[in-house]
Amino acid sequence: MKYFFDTSVLVAAICVDHVHHAPSQAAYLSATKNSSGCAAHSLAEVYATLTRLPGKQRTTCQQALLFVDDIRKRLTIVALDEDEYWLAITESVAEEIIGGTIYDALIARCALKARATIIYTWNLTHFRRLRSEIAKSVATP
């Protein structure tokens, strides 16, 4: 697998008013199941983000489900088993990762599992705090 999408890129691809919409959408629309993936956790993050956006940007639950379903159909969804989940947490402890960056570590672990060569994200600083093999793989679309 070549490309792995972080939640930040998926949300930007969907939200037309997002500052990074154009490059995110272009990367997303060029993605296929064979070439691209995302973490199973990202499906829930996309849903949560879309349904809590401020004002007119907020989507209904039904609209968010349609977007999440499109992601599910377009990308390979990668989930961690119990041992892989634990490994991601213990590696984060060793790297002194704190707070919400643990979720980026889980996404990164999924990218490693999928053998992705590029992790698309708009949260570059979060991912660059992780192991060197992750840090060197991150890019913006």
Image (cartoon, grey):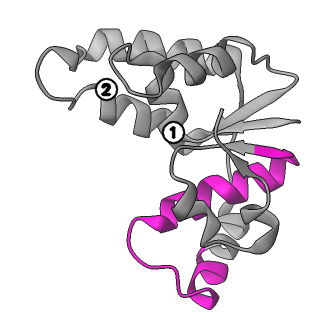
Q: Using the image as rendered, state which of residue 124 and residue 46 is in the foreground.
A: 124
Q: Is residue 12 visible?
A: yes
Residue 76 belongs to magenta span: no
In magenta, the rendered stretch is 89-118
The amino acid type, in three-letter code, at marker 1 is Thr
Tag 1's secondary structure? helix
Tag 2's secondary structure? helix
Residue 97 belongs to magenta span: yes
Picture coordinates of residue 133, whole percent (x, y): 82, 67
Left or right, 22 with reference to 115: left
- Please name the residue shown 27% across and 17% down the image: 61
Residue 50 has which mark?
2
Q: Is residue 39 above or below residue 20?
A: below
Q: Quadrant of residue 71?
A: top right
Q: Quadrant of the N terminus?
A: top right
Circle 2 Cα neighbour tier, 10 Å, few/some/many (<14 / 14–19 / ≥20): many
- Please name the residue shown 86% across and 26% down the image: 35
**Dominant secondary structure (helix, strand or loop) of the stretch shown in magenta:** helix
Picture coordinates of residue 27, whole percent (x, y): 68, 21
Left or right, 50 with reference to 53: right
Q: Quadrant of the C terminus?
A: top right
Picture coordinates of residue 94, whole percent (x, y): 63, 90
Q: Is residue 133 above or below residue 95?
A: above
Left or right, 116 with reference to 97: right
Circle 1 Cα neighbour tier, 10 Å, few/some/many (<14 / 14–19 / ≥20): many
Which residue bears the numbered disc 1? 7
Left or right, 47 with reference to 129: left
Q: Is residue 77 visible?
A: no
Q: Quadrant of residue 18?
A: top left
Mark 2 or mark 1: whose residue is earlier in sequence = 1
Picture coordinates of residue 53, whole percent (x, y): 21, 29
